[in-house]
Amino acid sequence: MAIGNITPSAATSWSKPVPLPPGTRTDSSGAPIKNIMLLTVPDAEFSLLRPELEHIGLPHRYVLHAPGERIEFVYFPNDGMISLVVTAYDGRSVEVGLLGREGMAGTSVTLGFPLAPYLAITQIPGNAARIRADVLQEILPLAPRLTQEMHRFVLLQGLQMAQVAACNRLHELEQRLARWLLMCQDRVDAEILPLTHEFLAQMLGSGRPTVTLAAGMLERAGLIENMRGTIRVLNRKKLEDAACECYRVVQHFNGGLGLK
């Protein structure tokens, strides 16, 4: 499945400058920058940002923005994973997007909207460089490449959200779980993912027993190992085969964001 006529083979090639190696740049505290977006912009533009970049830890369940809340800071994750979540009035929630070192949290600021449309919450701990939203808005007119990279991220993240929404409606939970685990691993680059079945159920908009059954099927096939509070990816290639075609489309978009 693909969005419109976009397929992994026929989609537009999202070429972009090659980012500097992680750690080449530092924030105002001297902490290394690993965020792909911040490693991609020219030196002149990064020099405008650096004095304003604040290093911050992102512990598990740290809320970056609440829906409807005015965005005070824009975050550029160096590692870890952030989920974008929609919560219904009855308390049920579903993940509509995720991001890691390839992007930023607080994208609506770049489009002139000061309020957060989703809950942005850390699901896999890490750290980030953050900047005050009002300061970033003052810098953007002087930083055309950064503005371009932010707009690129907004576009590609929107395409990913559309593909994931279609996937959630059309594909079986086992395929969706495989796709989601792969998307997580793309961002944290580790074989062990600190994810509980309860969390996976919330993110996939399903019941925990159903997710446990789906995870058990992947485990019996030798693709993952379910451990207490974590999931180990044992065979990524076979996990890709178990996922629906949506992952290949999303992976193509990931290439445009600097993820492999």
Image (cartoon, helix red, strand yellow):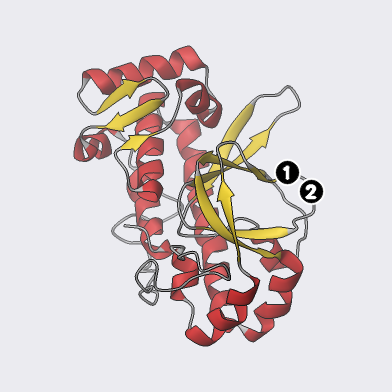
Do the CB atoms of the residues marked 2 and 1 lie less than 8 Å apart? yes
Q: Residues within 10 Å of mark 2 (few under 14, many from 20)?
A: few
Horizontally, residue 220 falls left or right of residue 244, namely left
Label drawn at residue 69: 2
Q: Locate residue 133, reporting x and y percent.
A: 72, 65
Q: Given the current orientation, which residue lies at the most extreme front position? A: 29
Residue sitting nearer the eye, 225 or 34 = 34
**Is 2 situated above or below 11?**
above
Identify which residue, 114 or 121, lies in the foreground.
121
Q: CA distance from mark 2 to mark 1?
A: 5 Å
For label 1, the residue is: 66
Residue in the picture at 46% in, 57% down: 101
Residue 73 position in % (x across, y down): 70, 59
Query: In the rendered view, would you say 28 is above or below 245?
Result: below
Three-letter amino acid code at the position of disc 1? Ala
| 135 w.r.t. 121: above or below | below
In the displayed structure image, the side of residue 241 where residue 214 appears, left or right: right
In this view, the residue in front, 197 or 95, is 197
Q: Quadrant of the C terminus?
A: bottom left
Left or right side of 182 for 54: right
